[in-house]
Image (spheres, rainbow, N blue to C red):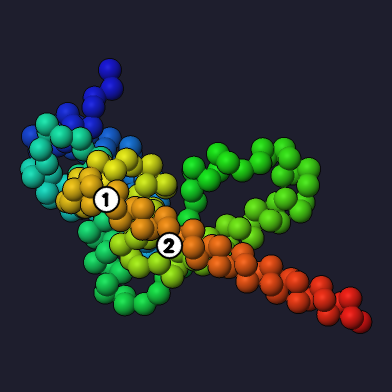
Amino acid sequence: MTRPDEVLAVDTVKGDLQAFEELVKRYQGAVFRLAFRMTGQREEAEDAAQEVFIQVFKKMYQFDPDKRFAPWLFRVATNICISRLRARKKVIMLNFDDPAQRRLEFEQADIDADPLISLEKSELQREVQEVLQELPEHYRLLLIMRYQLELNSQEIARSLETTRENVDVKMHRARRLLRTAMLKRLQEREETYGMQTRRQVKH
């Protein structure tokens, strides 16, 4: 029978190293994805993920087994990633992969059948990445936690040690900023395309 995360955490504190190894196996992918999308660099993300699990092991005694393990883990991971970003003090590039967005995309068969659809999909993803680059750090983090890690508002609140209401308010602002920036880019692209078309007609 599979032991719950919270039981594994308690067993880790008791000295069960296999329990900790199981937790690492369960969450190493999610922690790496969070680190990669925050740092934008694979090597640094790997280092950050390793640091996360080292800190988790050291601080496991602080975990409250009456609560869920995942939000506590992501809070540790988030703090480490933010510390690394602040140490770098420069703009980063993110690879934002929104599972909610994927559900709204065309079926893969349709994309494969029409190269233009595939091109448009790739262009949209590139523009989303560039727009995310321009968002403030805390809004970027919220979007990653919500859409990439698929955490709900309560879980994000626990991870960031804030209230659910605060998360909901900031999430609304983050979505609005992202939507506004994307619309602006689309309008600029349409205007550019229109100008090019008019030049071609004149010639």
Against 45, residue 191 (above or below) is below
Which structural element holds mark 1? helix
Residue 192, given in percent of the width and then of the height, sits at: 70, 74
Residue visible at 36% across and 58% down in the picture: 173
Question: Residue 125 or 200: which is nearer the viewer?
Answer: 200
- Label 1 and label 2: CA atoms lie apart by 15 Å
Can residue 36 be seen by looking at this rendering?
A: no
Quarter residue 177 falls in: bottom left
Residue 25, given in percent of the width and then of the height, sits at: 33, 39
**Mark 1 sits on what residue?**
167
The numbered dot on residue 177 is 2
Question: Residue 83 or 12: which is nearer the viewer?
Answer: 83
Which structural element holds mark 2? helix
Can residue 168 be seen by looking at this rendering?
A: yes
Residue visible at 24% across and 24% down in the picture: 3
* Residue furthest top as drawn: 1
Quarter residue 122 falls in: bottom right
Q: Amino acid at mark 2?
A: Leu
